Image (cartoon, rainbow, N blue to C red):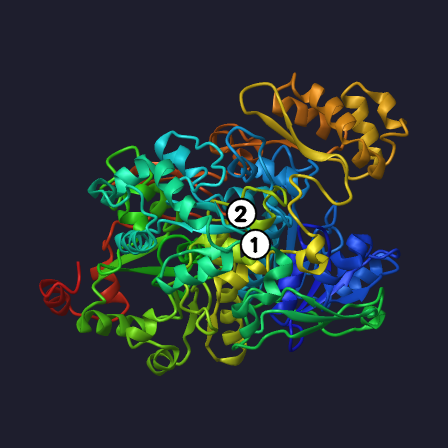
Amino acid sequence: MSGSVARVVELSSPFTRFAGRLLVGLGYEVVLVEPPEGDATRRELGGDAFVHWHAGKRSVVPASPEELRALLATADVLLDGSPGGAEEIVTGLDGLVHVRVTPFGLLGPRTDWQGTDLVVAALGGMLAQVGDPDGPPLRLPEQQAEQLAGVNAAIAALLGLRARRTGTGQLVDVSAQACVAAALEAGTLAYLHEDRVPPRPGSVHPLVPHGLFRSADGYLGGGLGGSPRMWDALLDWLREENAAADLTEPRWQDPVERKKHQEHVFKVVQDFVGMWPKAEFAERAQARKLPWAAVDLPHELPDNPQLTARDFFTRVRTPEGERTDLGFPFAFPEGHRVRELDVPALGADQQMLAERRPGPTPAVVNTKAPALHGIRVLDLTWVLAGPYCTKVLADHGADVIKVESMGRPDPTRFAPFMHLSRGPHTDPNTNGYFNEVNRNKRSIALDTRTDEGVAVLRELIAHADVLVENFSSTVMRKLGLGYEELTRINPDLVYVSMSGMGHTGPRNGWVSYADTVSASAGLTGLTGWGPDDVVGVIYGHGDIVAGLQAALATVAALEHRAVTGRGQHIDLSQLEATAAHMGTSLLGGPAVTPSGNTHPSWSPQGVYRCLGADRWLAVSVRDDSEWAALCEVIGRPELATDERTFTAEARRCSTALVDSALGEWTRTLPADVAAEELQARGVPAGAVQDGRELVEHDPQLRARGFYVRKEHPVAGAFLHEGVPIRLTRTPGGIRAAAPVLGADTDAVLSEVAGFSTERVQRLREAGVLR
C-alpha cells in the first residue's frame, strides 16, 4: 500500500456512500471528492444525510481533472459512483483498485438505465417479496438496495487490495441490481427448484412458522420456532396461562399438521400475545429460550441494553454540536470500536491535492487466481447468515470446508418445511436452499458430540486461516473452543463468530432468527404504510446482511493479518450488523415512521399497477425536469406547468391528482413497456420482478451471465444465483455445485490434517465420521 493506511478516494453516489462509510469503520483513509457546491447529501434531510454517510471522511474539491488525477495517483482504491465513470482519468494507474458501482452494471442493454433504490429494488426482485399478497409491493426502508450495493462494493475493494498483493490493480464491476438479485433468500430459489413463484407473504414467513404479531402496545416478531423443543416450550407456556385452546390435542405435535393449519395456530398464539406489552412478552419468551423480539423503531435503539452495553453507537462531531448515530456492523480491528467521528467542512482537506506521496506499486508476480485463492476456511455455520458469508468467500476462491455436525444437523438439509425440491423432501442432498448457499464448498461430516470428534475438529483448526460459525454465544465454549483456546491451537487464526446478539452483553444468550433481529434493529418497524399499518420484513434480509458483513469482516481481517501478522476474533452481532443498515433513521428521531414507497423529497415515487395480474411499475421522479419528461410520456404535458404539480412539494400536496394521472397510464401497459418508455426519457422506472421474471426475462442479468448452471451429483443440473462482484483480472465464480453430505471427509482429513487411511477408517467405525 502507498502508505501505512490504504487511501480510498470516493466519487460518491447513493450506491457507493455506504461502502465509503464501512471503510471508514475499518480504519481506511477515505477521501470524499466534492463538487464546488458540496455533495448533494449536505442538502438532504437538513444535512443529516451528509452527517451519516460521510462523517469520518476527508473532503476535497479538485479544481480540474488534473488535480483529481494527481490525487488518484496517491490512492489505493477508487470508489467510483460517478455517472459517466472515471475510466479515462485513471488510465495508466496500474496499481489502483477501481471499484465501479452502478445501478445495473457495466455490461448489458440497460447499463445506461437510471436507477434509484426503489427502481433497483423492483428490478432486482426485492419489492416482490415484501407487502400483502393482495396489495401493492412495498419497499424496505432506509435504502436497503443501495446499502446491499454498498457492502458488496466494500468487499470488492478489499478483494481488489488482496489480489493486488500478487498482481496489479484492476477494474471491479459492481451491479446494484445483481447485488439485490443475489440477496432474496428463497425468492428465486422457489422458482428454480420447485417451479413456484411465492406470493408476497404479508406478515407471515413463507417457509419458517414465524411472522408479525400485535401486542398490547405495538408489535412482536416471532413464532413457533424451528425445533420440537421450541414448540413444546411455547405450548407449556400457553397451558400455564390457560391460553392453549385446542393446541394441546395430539395432532398439533406434528409439524406438518401445524404448517397445514398454520392460520389457526397463529390465531391462538395471537390471542395470547395480544394481552402482553411487547417488551415484557419478549423478555418472558427469551427466558424460555423462545425466539421472540419486540418490534422497535430506530429512535428506540439507544434504549436497547444489548446495543448500549456493547458500545454500538458512534458520537459524531458536527459544527452544531455532537450527535449520536448508528455505529458500524462489527468492532475492528481486534475488538476496537470507532467511537467518534468528525463531519468534514467542504474542502477541509484541500492540502491533500498538493501531496505527492508515492502511489501503490503493483506486485512483480501477476497471478490471475481468484482473490482468496490459497485461503482455507473452516465453515461451522448453518441455515443462512453464516453459509451466506462463507459462500461469498468460496465464490472468490477460498477453500471452504463445511464441517457438518451429525449432532447439529443443518435445517436447510433436513427440515421438510425448508426443503425446496421437485422431488421428495427427505433427501438431505437435494434441497435447493442448502445447495445455493453452499456451492463451491467441501463437506466433512463429523460428530462433535464425541471427544474424538472435537479432537478431529481441533486438528482441522490448526491448519485453517479462518473459522466462521453462527452458533449461539455459548456453543464454542462448551466445546472447549473459546477464543483463548483457538489461539493456542492456531495463533494466526481469523475467528469470526456470528451469533444473533454477540458474545457479550446482557442479551448474549437470546435466541434469534432473521425476523427477530430485524424486529430489534428497527427494520421491521419501518416496513409499512404508516405507524398503524406495519407489514414487516418477513424473509431473511437480516441474515443476508449479517452474512455480507461477516464476509467483509473476514477479508478485512485477512488484510490486517497480512500487514501485522496477527489474527483476531471478530465478535459480529447480527443485531448490530442489521442496525448498521438503518441509514439516517436514528438521526431523524421519533419523526421517522413507516412511509410506504414514498421518498422524503422526491415526488412522485411509488409503485403503480400495470396491465396483467399483479403487475407493477416502480417510478422515482427526482426533480422537475424528470417530472416534465414523465408528463410528456404519459400524454399529460399540461401537468408539467400546472401550479398544483409544478414542484415536488406541490406534487406531494396533490398526491391524488399525480397518482391518478400516472396510474391511468400504467394500468393500460405492460410494466416492461412502461419502464422502457420512461427510461428512454431519463426517468427512473422499472418493473417489479419476481423470481421467474428475473430468471427468464431480465435482459440485463442474462447479458451478465448472472444465473449459472452447474450439475449436482444427486439433485442434477440447476441454475445458481451468480456473483454480483466482477473482478476483471481475478474473477470469482461458481466452480462447483454444493457438496453431498460428507462427500469430502476422507480427502479433507488426508490433505489438510495428514490423517492416514487407517485412522480415518477407525474414526468411521467408531461413528465419529460419516
Would you call the spot at circle 1 few (<14 residues within 10 Å), some (14-19), or many (20 or more)? many
Seen in the picture, residue 319 relative to 136 is either above or below; the reply is: below
Which amino acid lies under the numbered mark 1 shown in the image of this protein?
Asn
Q: Quadrant of residue 632?
A: top right
Q: Is residue 207 visible?
A: no
Residue contact at pointers 1 and 2, CB within 8 angstroms: yes
Residue 83 position (above or below residue 766):
above
- Front residue of this view, candidates 12 and 562: 12
Q: Nearer the viewer, residue 93 or 327?
A: 327
Quarter-of-image position of residue 764: bottom left
Gap in angstroms between the C-alphas marked 1 and 2:
8 Å
Quadrant for the C terminus in the image = bottom left
Where residue 357 sits: x, y (%)?
75, 74
Q: Residue at x 54, y 74 (%)?
A: 309
Q: In the displayed structure, does residue 689 sit left or right of residue 454?
A: right
**What is the quadrant of the N terminus in the image?**
bottom right
Residue count near mark 2 (Cα–Cα under 10 Å), binned few <14, some 14–19, many ≥20: many
- When asked about the image quadrant of residue 99, the answer is bottom right
Give the residue number, with chain letter if any, for mark 2: 724
Question: Where residue 619 sits: x, y (%)?
Answer: 69, 33
Residue at 55% in and 35% down: 703
- The residue drawn where x is 35% and y is 62% is 288
Residue 398: percent from the left, percent from the top?
41, 60
Percent coordinates x, y for residue 684 in the rendering = 71, 35
Residue type at mark 2 is Pro
Question: Is residue 203 visible in the rendered structure shown here?
Answer: yes
Which label is found at residue 5?
Answer: none
- Work out whether 653 lies above or below 283: above
The residue under label 1 is 152
Q: Secondary structure at mark 1?
A: helix
Residue 318 shown left or right of residue 383 in the figure: right
